[in-house]
Amino acid sequence: MSWPDEWPELIPLIPFVQAIWADGALSSEELGRVVRAIDGMDWLADGARSALRRWLDPGLPPLPSAVGALGARIRAAPLAAGEATGSLTDLGLALSTAERKGGPWSTPEAEAALRALEASLGVHGTEVARAARGEPPPAAQDRAPPPTGFDGARLALHLDQPKGEARARARDALLDPALRIELGLPLPEYRRRVLAAVRHLAERGLGSLAYPEGYGGTGSAAAAVAVFETLAMGDLSVLVKFGVQFGLFGGSVLQLGTERHHRAHLRAIGSLELPGCYAMTEVDHGSDVRSLETTATYGPAGDDLVVHTPHDGAAKRYIGNAALHGRMAVVFARLVVAEEDHGVHAVLVPIRDAGGRVLDGVRIEDCGLKEGLNGVDNGKIWFDRVRVPRESLLDRFASIDASGRYRSDIPSAGRRFFRMLRTLVMGRVSIAAAALSASKVGLTIAVRYAARRRQFGPDGGVERPILAYRTIQRELMPGLATAYALHFAVRALQDDLDRPGRADSAELEVEAAGLKAYASEHCVAVLQACREACGGWGYLASSRFAALKADTDVFTTFEGANSVLYQLVAKGLLSRFRDEMGDLSLRRAVRYLAERAETAVGQLNPVVTRRTDEGHLLDPGFHRAALAYREQRLLRSAAQRIRARLDAGIDSFQAVTEVQDHLVTLARAHVERLLLDRFHEGVARAPTPGLSEGLASVAALFALSRIETDRGWFLESGYLEGNKARAIRARVSALCAEARELSGALVEGFGIPDFLLPEEARG
Amino acid sequence: MSWPDEWPELIPLIPFVQAIWADGALSSEELGRVVRAIDGMDWLADGARSALRRWLDPGLPPLPSAVGALGARIRAAPLAAGEATGSLTDLGLALSTAERKGGPWSTPEAEAALRALEASLGVHGTEVARAARGEPPPAAQDRAPPPTGFDGARLALHLDQPKGEARARARDALLDPALRIELGLPLPEYRRRVLAAVRHLAERGLGSLAYPEGYGGTGSAAAAVAVFETLAMGDLSVLVKFGVQFGLFGGSVLQLGTERHHRAHLRAIGSLELPGCYAMTEVDHGSDVRSLETTATYGPAGDDLVVHTPHDGAAKRYIGNAALHGRMAVVFARLVVAEEDHGVHAVLVPIRDAGGRVLDGVRIEDCGLKEGLNGVDNGKIWFDRVRVPRESLLDRFASIDASGRYRSDIPSAGRRFFRMLRTLVMGRVSIAAAALSASKVGLTIAVRYAARRRQFGPDGGVERPILAYRTIQRELMPGLATAYALHFAVRALQDDLDRPGRADSAELEVEAAGLKAYASEHCVAVLQACREACGGWGYLASSRFAALKADTDVFTTFEGANSVLYQLVAKGLLSRFRDEMGDLSLRRAVRYLAERAETAVGQLNPVVTRRTDEGHLLDPGFHRAALAYREQRLLRSAAQRIRARLDAGIDSFQAVTEVQDHLVTLARAHVERLLLDRFHEGVARAPTPGLSEGLASVAALFALSRIETDRGWFLESGYLEGNKARAIRARVSALCAEARELSGALVEGFGIPDFLLPEEARG
């Protein structure tokens, strides 16, 4: 088959035909669509159209040699290099001009039709046109110049806010020798060093920032999280011991106790004079903390509470600070008053004396070696009828009065417990922030290592940095983009902690749960990818990945296992109001949502599902619409599926359990939509046009790589067609190459001090 | 809107309409297809059809209350429980009978049309019909009885073969106190214990199984890998030190040396009298070993070779056994004879004397602490003009004769080196086997823990084992199925090692590279999922996950980084013959493949792309066809894409680099197709019908979960439609629930001895 040169008006289509067969990825349906588009070009003569159709017959494809001849013709055309390779359309029209053929393509309508056809193919026009002309893509060079105006130092300064001063204090502290703990210490020595480090931080006043001013603090939870986030760049055992003492132990005294408890303990907690524990998890109940079995029984023998472990399964487990240093514990136990069980409450229970001896009635066992965080002394605690005064009950939400009567403004035991838990939201925000910091450290190390490490190259040529390879870019760049998305989302969450009203709202709780789950999951995945990208060097402890990975792995479990938290997020979305998450209201909520769903079947615009032009694919509006559509549709169908089960008489536990995987999918979709919104807000607030432009490209990478990863869902639900999914893949690759050019500045923006990095990864 | 009861023949369609709106997942296009199907049912009166169409209008969906009324009607029908809930069709027809309405549905044609309609909806008919009737699915119970005939002990016995005797010897050895190494030992002590353990294994004759009978072995590489696979259930530092000594060091002497070397060293290596190293990797060259820079120069001053590290970047790095115990090393170096560089060869170089003192001219540095495998003493080695006799060259493929002339039967330096590397294929097979064993240990622990651990439950009801939850099943069961697929594939590979001709074929090399990459990647993912499923307990070192994860992480890097190996697999597929993998032949091969592609666009049968009936979805033929289609299509398009670039004059390094991610995708697709074939062979060879039936269900889970994971690709390429993708998801969930019932027997089948498991996970 030779090209029908009797129809010179077909010349602009040569690059299209060549691209279609050289790529070979079009289905016959899609090929049919191309033919229909050409049929619609009524400025072509009938004979020309049918000649062209012979080249597009899926049943009788052209021989490779014929396709090869088209390629040769394209390369032979006398065009200036790079001039006509902006798209297949540009190339086709230039070809036509070069061969000095006139034709009907000068009208805007005709050119638009060509561009529309190009978009419908779902190819990366510039890349394909360049390849057809034999021009290497820009990615072939080792290094493009960094984009002007995208300055790492400037970015770092910007990202250091808000709470820059608190961050600076924490960075200073990390420099202190007390905080520089060597690798590979024996367990007892490691624990001693970690305790000393936490003491040092307390002496600098960093432990009590969240406490009221009267107790050595600033009253700013946001500042406390900023410190925690910064400390997470260093030794993570120090971080977690710090968090147990000042956040979990101190935070629960602050949030669940009243002034009496604050006066008695907060200063001693903030200075580490009173080391303590947060004793919630039990052997038999970790995720399902509502079902804890430790009891705190009031009376009847006296005006005190008897704290007791009824059986081995109710022993407190994995309690940080318990094995060695804790002297007091906030113990979560079922409060029993006059034989009535009021559900889980928190009680202050001394466990060691000032000399460090375990008190009578208390038994403690060391949890021993763990995967990571071995500088933290986790322990198991049993209580044998330990008596504490009635005032030991942390009584912000419920109290026992002097006459021994139980009082609470919140009538239901379930709601009361959830209300208590909500005040502890800071823990989840902190873990999200810490996971993100660890990811940033890992990404900084891997990106710099991969930019310097060279391996392979053309025969006789210079070896290329491994970051120039698409496989490595694909492994690191989307993770880097997600770290930026998380950065803006976690910072917004931190800010919210200082906003009265918002700080203990149900919305914030759902957001914190979702971000903690997503950030910790991202951290595990990104550190693994970073370690692997660094090969054998990444396996040496000195590269830091060993500790980063081992220490952060449990972040997926801390403060709620991720799969449980995602379900909580989904239930929150379904219920809208976390307070009403009892069964009855779940039933009400799904009914409401199902009724609200006016159009049960999404009416998608076929033009949008197929559009693949660059303007559209990079449009933040498209990204936002796609992620919002997925979230809304998953929310609606989750509500419908639960409702159908409830209506069928299935009990609500079973109904929710049956759609668990759907709920987890919904929650992740929600978090990704939220991340994109926060990222867009971050782009809008960037201090210079250069930073804003660069960040916008990273935001596009985040959004498109999320859509690419879940393209199964988008295709299945008709939101994308095949050509668009392919175009998105090509666009993600292009954005990865773009992100690589920005990556030096992007990791500099994270602001990890050089002294925390291995020599090979310093800035 | 109320149901059009004036048309009693529509009653069988009530469950369909209810399911369509209660699920709410259908696109308008799919709804249009339902309407067209109904339009084709010409036994319905026109009036009935248009009444029904009103219920299926995407623009005007029925109110939830109307859909609810349909549900109530279904539940109210006087049917025996479980009787009519095999499918929506069964339910609909039973409903019609129960309401005593006659109708036109008794013909086989009409019933078939209903069943076809049901299949096109892509719902799990039984599940939906049960839900509509308010009957809980079987998964709602805590535990179904284990399927008869699927017996764990019997399975274990079967899977122990072949080389059961070698496996038994290795299991015995693991029981010995010398092999039971405590957790958390200080580095020097750990290394001593590991050396002692390896010595113990040598004394039992387990190190030299692969060597010829004359040298203390059995000549069976398969037996050696079986031992390695079994030892991988225990301490992995012992395993890796064992592998370095007997596999890498001894294996290269055996494979690259000639009788002279065998006589001189093999016995001493097998008994560990001569501890040694395999010194390949250099600081600057890890993946790209063809470019190593250490030199071994013959003469000119005497009849010897001068081994030299020309600069710091050419120092040998991460060399196992080097920091403390190695006395000799197989050093890979560029062989220079009479100023001609013949490429990389292997030379035996003593590095320590019998007293353990490092020899003159050799400098060794300890690599220090690593993420895992800390019982192995890795080191960095520099050579400063170290002289060894000419005979130290391992000269199976190339030699220097007495007159100082270089001789080899293989003319090209590149091909010679690849030929040498191929003989070392056992290393990759061994890592694949070890990664799989580690996955099996992790799965055994997690599955048993999750079957025993209870958390949450209906109000006032018994708490459910976490393995009863779909999220946990979804996290563990596909990984378990993949472990079985890998089991059969790795065993087939082991067998091949003893088949002359096959053992050092290019095909086996490609297969070993692919399985090593896939197995190690699976190991990392599955251990992470297992650890998380076990929550806080999984984080304790005593649960074994800490060491399993840290020790195996580097398996993704050992013996070639996975992304590099996948590219090697893809190039192997493209080139067909690994020998000819030079650039020229790559060009020839892609041309050949592109020419061979007769139909460039797949002609897919629309009936198949939409079929969702159980028979089809569970058909091994469908699974095989889907995975083979993907592989073939990716292979063809990879060839086309490379060819288009080569034709455009892009150099081959750049051309291949640009399609790197495509090549990795192709390689994974190839491995998954191979795994499925091996799994099917394994099912066919199962010794009892019960075992065969159970394994077939696991094979279906493997195949369908792979298709589900990659449904983006299948949808994009038109191989699946949306309804089928959804049906596959529902089917994977059902197979996960089925696999849970088999999981106790499946992990028993792995045959991990109880003494290697934490108490909580013993059988």
Image (cartoon, coloured by chain):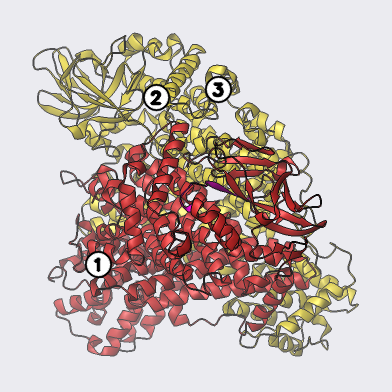
Chain colours: A yellow, B red
Is the residue B215 above or below the residue A43 in the image?
above
Would residue B34 appear left or right of B658 to someone viewing this image? Answer: left
Within the magenta stretch, is there residue B256? no
Report the mark closest to the observer, 1 or 2.
2
Residue type for callout 2: Val
Identify which residue is drawn at 80% across, 67% down: A134
Q: CA distance from mark 1 to mark 3?
A: 68 Å
The spot of residue A172 in percent (x, y) is 60, 19
Q: Tell which of A103 and B758 is nearer to you.
A: B758
Which contiguous range is marked in magenta? Answer: B270-280
Circle number at residue A180:
3
Q: Tell which of A352 and B754 is nearer to you.
A: B754
Q: Tell which of B728 and B370 is nearer to you.
A: B370
Is the residue B626 above or below the residue A307 in the image?
below
Report the mark closest to the observer, 1 or 3.
3
Is the residue B308 above or below the residue B147 in the image?
above
Residue type for callout 3: Arg
